[in-house]
Amino acid sequence: MRQKLSSVAGNRWDFLQGFAWNHAAKITEYVLLYIFSVVVARSLGPFANGLYATLVSISQLLLTFSSVAFDLALNRFVPQFVESEAKVAYLFRQLLTVKIILLVVLCVVLFFSWNFVGAWFSLTSPAGFYLTFVIALGCLRAISSSFAALWISQLQPKMMFVVNSSSVLLQILAVQLTMTNHSDVRIVFLIVLLGSLFTTAAYIVGGRKYFRITPERIPLHRVRSFIGWLWANALVAYVYGKQGDIMLLSYFAIAKTSIGFYDVASSLSMLPGFIVAAGLSGISVSMFSRLTASQPTKVPVFWAKLSSFLTRLTIPVYCFMLVYSSNVIAFLYSGVYSAAAQLLQMFLVARIAARLFGGGENLDVLLNLNAERPAVILGIGCGAMNLALNLVLIPHLGVTGAVLGTGITTVFMDASTWFLLRRRARVPLLFKNWIQSLAVGVIPVAVVKLLVPNPTVFQLALCGLFCIFVWSWSMILRNEPYKWIVNRRQV
């Protein structure tokens, strides 16, 4: 019994350590990237920022097609071979080789179809520069993401923390310096490429031992099946995500200025969830993989505690941004982007509703219950629904139609994965927790809104601090999110 308890505590301690480092790395990178995006948006204006967002969206397509399934496969299977570096090296090198081959094929296809792509996204000259940017950025990020997934799967993301934060910080400084000299948007593209090159080179140097170790062969049949289904899921996720919306908005010749508004609203709506759950990226898949292999009965309990904790953290922040959306946008992006406030509110309402059914943690569990096939089928259905909604709504409502389609699909997708997870693992619907979190989020925000309806920047910061104070005390008084953390020494 004592050995079993030590194993439980060890798993949770490893998870907490890995989560802490991964969260620090992700949060630091995201905050710096967000500062970078704000600096770029304020400097370029809505039109040029829309152009920048469009090209990054196309490069993200390369990253999605070539990387997501392989990176998740590392998160899923490396924990099973963590005791043998030779087996890990074999798995990593095999997946990286296939990824590079796939990247070459995708880049060749993109090169020969660029005229069509440029017409689709309304991209004019310099077409050659745009193509080079998309291919180079997509390839560099795809290669570096493999190394990041390798370290995350072993719950050792310290390398990411150092490299990513350094890279983005250098990019921010470079943009600040060049924008004071009235440089155009192509200089921003060049800075982003140099930053990605620095990150990839640092990752290769940091992970060089996996190219020196003599690999030990392992069977890859299960890995190939997993990758196949996850690759299909990645394509579907692109369709009902931000990049897919930008693609359709470009197809319907929506103005780049409006796309710039959409980009701002979408990015801001994802900010609270990312700040709270960034450290779970890859880590939760690896942790659920360990539990599924050693203590499968603990999976539903761990999911319930994790999902409950994330809901209590994210919904109050969503509520604050919903009420003060125009003030937040004006503070971060200036009044030029005021038209994005209504779009942001629509995004936030959808995310609050979807949180009733959990979020990305649902898929993390399903992947470890060998349920990737039904999960992908659900995703395909949701992708088709989002595509249909966009095709109907965008021609009449423009970017508002894109937000409506994505919001409806987000709620439906999270509800669908929860129903599937309930069938597989008998997880509960955390309705009481959702209602309590919503009440805790709404009440203090409503009070400060009545007292300070049109706050200055300083007053907005004070309102935010007051709400955080109330939310923190509500968490401490309820105390439930902390009961599942077992102190290693006590065990």
Image (cartoon, rainbow, N blue to C red):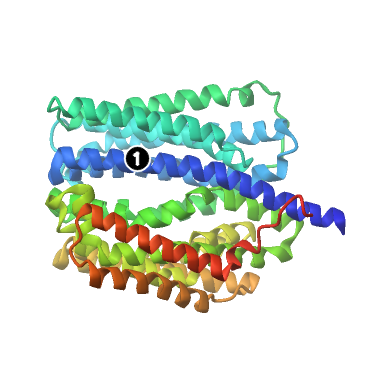
Q: Nearer the viewer, residue 433 or 149?
A: 433
How many residues crowd mark 1 within 10 Å: few (<14), some (14–19), many (20+)?
some
Residue at position x 26%, y 38% in the image: 113
* Residue 483 as seen in the image, left or right of residue 459: right
Q: Residue at x 20, y 64 (%)?
A: 342
Residue at the right extreme of this rendering? 1
Quarter of the C terminus within the rendering: bottom right
State the image coordinates of residue 432 (x, y, percent, origin top left).
Answer: 51, 79
Residue holding disc 1: 33
Q: Is residue 205 above or below residue 8?
A: above
Q: Residue at x 35, y 44 (%)?
A: 61
Occupied quadrant, residue 347? bottom left
Left or right: 184, with 4 as reference point: left
Residue drawn 28% across the image and 34% down it: 112
Is residue 414 depicted above or below 146 in this figure?
A: below
* In-image side of 375 versus 41 (left or right): right
In this view of the protein, which residue sits in the foreground, 164 or 2? 2
| Image location (x, y in percent) of residue 68 | 48, 45
Q: Is residue 380 visible?
A: no
Which residue type carries mark 1?
Leu
Q: Quadrant of residue 117?
A: top left
Residue 139 seen anywhere in this rendered image of the structure: yes
Q: Foreground residue, 87 or 331?
A: 331
Q: Please state the horizontal and vertical placement of residue 370, each as a whole percent of the image.
A: 63, 59
Q: Does 486 sit above or below residue 99?
A: below
Specify the quadrant that holds the N terminus: bottom right
Q: In terms of secondary structure, where does tag 1 sit?
A: helix
